[in-house]
Amino acid sequence: MSLLMNWLESLHIDPNITNKCSRRRNRRSTCSICSEVCNKGSLSLTEEAIEINLETCTSCGECMIACPLSAIEGIPTSREINSGCLIYSDCYTPSVKELLIYKKRGLAHIRVNTSRLNENWEQTINEANHQLTLLGQPVLEIVRKSEEKTFSRRGLFSSLQKEGKQLAKSMTPASWKMNANDWVLRHYYPDDQFYTVDIDKDKCTFCQACFSFCAQAVFQVENESLQIEHQNCVNCRDCYDICPEEAIQIKPEIKKKENSQLGFHIGECRDCGRAFHTFQEDKRTCPVCFNRDSGWLSPFE
Ligand code: SF4
Ligand code: SF4
């Protein structure tokens, strides 16, 4: 018995928020996606970071699925998936992102054992199917549980055997055990982008704060052009939160992936003499000198 208990305990891992979390890297982060999806109120935002209350957390996995930066680890998701079917349950509503990922992992359909789906499931499936259509993918189908049958003695045993096999499958869906890094849409849809990142060249001072904070390598500076790889964007909003000029917008938009190239100029700052990048040809000062308080003496005069 104690061996069994030890084994069961070894399967339990407490959820853990890693240093990938925006709130741990960026003091200006406004991300609260995980706490919004947790219906137990187990995630609390503090000034410094975000904390999980392990007393109330049920390890449902909602936060791990929702986190755009895959920053929450250690939660096995508790969805019932049987022979490639997601089994409908009133206890939770899957997210659209979750359904899009399941579809690419081989989800055949959603099986409903009751007379009808609840409204939240219906809305989520409709939105997922809308997005699948935009992605050029077959939509998710709903299959109702077939009518109860009366069995002969032989039929009853064969049915129990079948149910037993299905139960075993549902208890060990190894291919459906997913970790934090498995919840990234672009890994499943490599030819498509889900967000478009817009930089307003009139507002941007090319301070490069957004380039440093973006953990997904969306921004690349090459020669005299800024390349934006929209497909890499996961809508974490780190760049939006850090930009002092409010020059960035992230637009949800599904389309075939493309990169943008924004040309820039290299100038020499008239105050500090250092080379700097700018989108405005007539700019004469670098962002550091430009933002220096004019009431202070310049260290370069
Ligand atoms: S571009 Fe902005 S929103 Fe997109 S992944 Fe990078 S930091 Fe996050
Ligand atoms: S943080 Fe804002 S101002 Fe700085 S480079 Fe990015 S978009 Fe431009």
Image (cartoon, rainbow, N blue to C red):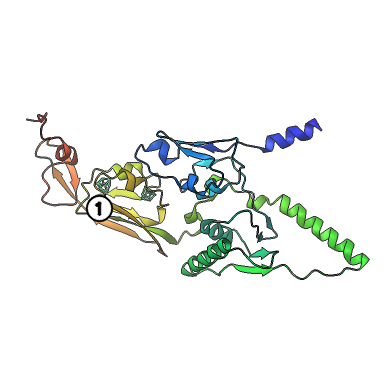
Q: Amino acid at mark 1?
A: Ser
Residue 200's place in the image compared with 20, above or below, is below
Residues 276 and 222: in front is 276
Q: Position of residue 201 (x, y in %)?
A: 22, 54
- Disc 1, SS: strand
Q: Is residue 181 left or right of residue 172?
A: left
Residue depicted at x 58% and y 62%: 121
Q: Position of residue 283 (x, y in %)?
A: 12, 47
Q: Position of residue 193 (x, y in %)?
A: 42, 60
**Few, some or many C-alpha atoms within 10 Å of disc 1 (few <14, some 14-19, many ≥20)?**
some
Residue 84's place in the image compared with 139, above or below, is above
Asked if the residue at label 1 sits under 8 Å from ligand 2, the reply is no
Q: Is residue 150 left or right of residue 264?
A: right
Q: Position of residue 22 (x, y in %)?
A: 41, 41
In which quadrant of the rendered view does residue 125 lie? bottom right
Q: Looking at the rendering, in which quadrant would you find the C terminus?
A: top left
Task: Please count the marks in the image.
Answer: 1
Give the labeled residue for mark 1: 225
Q: Looking at the rendering, in which quadrant would you find the N terminus?
A: top right
Residue depicted at x 41% and y 33%: 48
| The furthest residue to the right | 153
Residues 295 and 217: in front is 295
Residue depicted at x 15% and y 40%: 290
